[in-house]
DNA sequence: ATATATAGTCAGTTTTTTATGACTTATTGT
DNA sequence: ACAATAAGTCATAAAAAACTGACTATATAT
């Protein structure tokens, strides 16, 4: 595998089945895992987990453990994540009427 | 399969192994199939074909037959394609230094 | 006559991405 | 005591994307 195109790689981490929706939710405020699953009933757990891990790894989201026992976790946008939101907005503007 | 997120779908058609590079080439001027293959030696024919078909289907590129016999074809950006170029530029600006 | 270039197509395999269902640890509610 | 909620993990299966190599047709160049 050989991409070597930074824009492509970035686009790839931004792309993925539920990522746009996750960004949309996170743009309002920090989101929890269960909250995402409830909001996206068609999404499956594993895919959401993977999406969150990837977005965290690329510094778009921060994982924040609110309370251990019982485990409560929140995912919030980083500054970079906010840039991604702007990107999604211009993508939405590209959608034809 | 159920996406129902227009932004996601648009992002998906923009994403794909050689699409960013194809856009970059087309931003300079109309490109030919063989030109793309030469510029991207690691790319494979089939993938490039599929990418071109998808970008054409989503109205980012126009296929233009210059001469039949011998067959010469050019792919150029549409207005929508130019919007995509702008999008790629802002993606590039997101890449960390 | 043979090779090269044009722009692909086709069948088949490999790789990557998504999805499924069961299971985990700990807490709160009834 | 029992069910539900929280945030996942794990092995596996199915679906989508990418790759491989051979092949097509027409034309120009050697």
Image (cartoon, coloured by chain):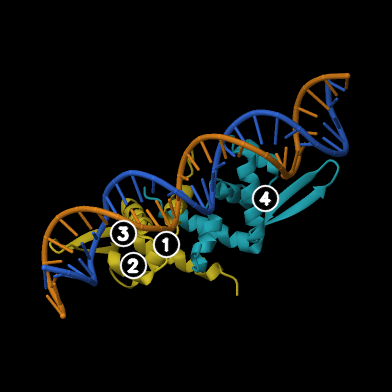
Chain colours: A yellow, B cyan, C orange, D blue
Task: Let me know if marks 4 and 3 both belong to one chain.
Answer: no
Label 3 SS: strand
- Label pair 1/2, CB-CB below 8 angstroms: yes
Label 2 resides on the chain identified as A
Mark 2 is surrounded, within 10 Å at the Cα level, by few (under 14), some (14 to 19) or many (20 or more) other residues, namely: some
> Residue A85: which quarter of the image?
bottom left
Q: Which residue is mark 3?
A: A61
In the displayed structure, does residue B2 sit left or right of residue A80?
A: right
The residues bearing labels 2 and 4 have C-alpha atoms spaced at a distance of 43 Å
Describe residue A40's horizontal placement relative to residue B47 as left or right.
left
Image label count: 4
| Residue linked to disc 1 | A18
Please give the residue where the numbered disc 4 appears in the rendered image.
B29
Q: Are marks 1 and 3 in contact (CB under 8 Å)?
A: no
Q: CA distance from mark 1 to mark 3?
A: 14 Å
Q: Is B39 displayed left or right of C19 in the figure?
A: right
| Image location (x, y in percent) of residue B42 | 56, 35
Mark 1 → mark 4, Cα distance in angstroms: 34 Å
CB-based contact (under 8 Å), mark 3 and mark 2: no
**Quadrant into which the C terminus of chain A falls:** bottom right
- Please determine whether, in this image, residue D18 is positioned above or below residue D29: below
Q: Position of residue A13 (x, y in %)?
A: 42, 52
Can you identify the residue that label 2 sits on?
Answer: A36
């Amino acid at each position: 595998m050989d991409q070597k195109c930074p824009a492509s790689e970035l686009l790839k981490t931004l792309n993925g089945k539920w990522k746009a929706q996750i960004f949309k939710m996170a743009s309002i405020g920090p989101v929890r895992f269960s909250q995402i699953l409830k909001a996206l009933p068609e999404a499956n757990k594993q895919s959401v987990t993977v999406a969150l891990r990837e977005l965290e790894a690329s510094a778009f989201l921060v994982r924040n453990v609110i309370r251990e026992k019982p485990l409560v976790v929140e995912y919030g946008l980083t500054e970079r994540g906010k840039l991604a939101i702007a990107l999604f907005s211009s993508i939405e503007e590209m959608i034809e009427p």
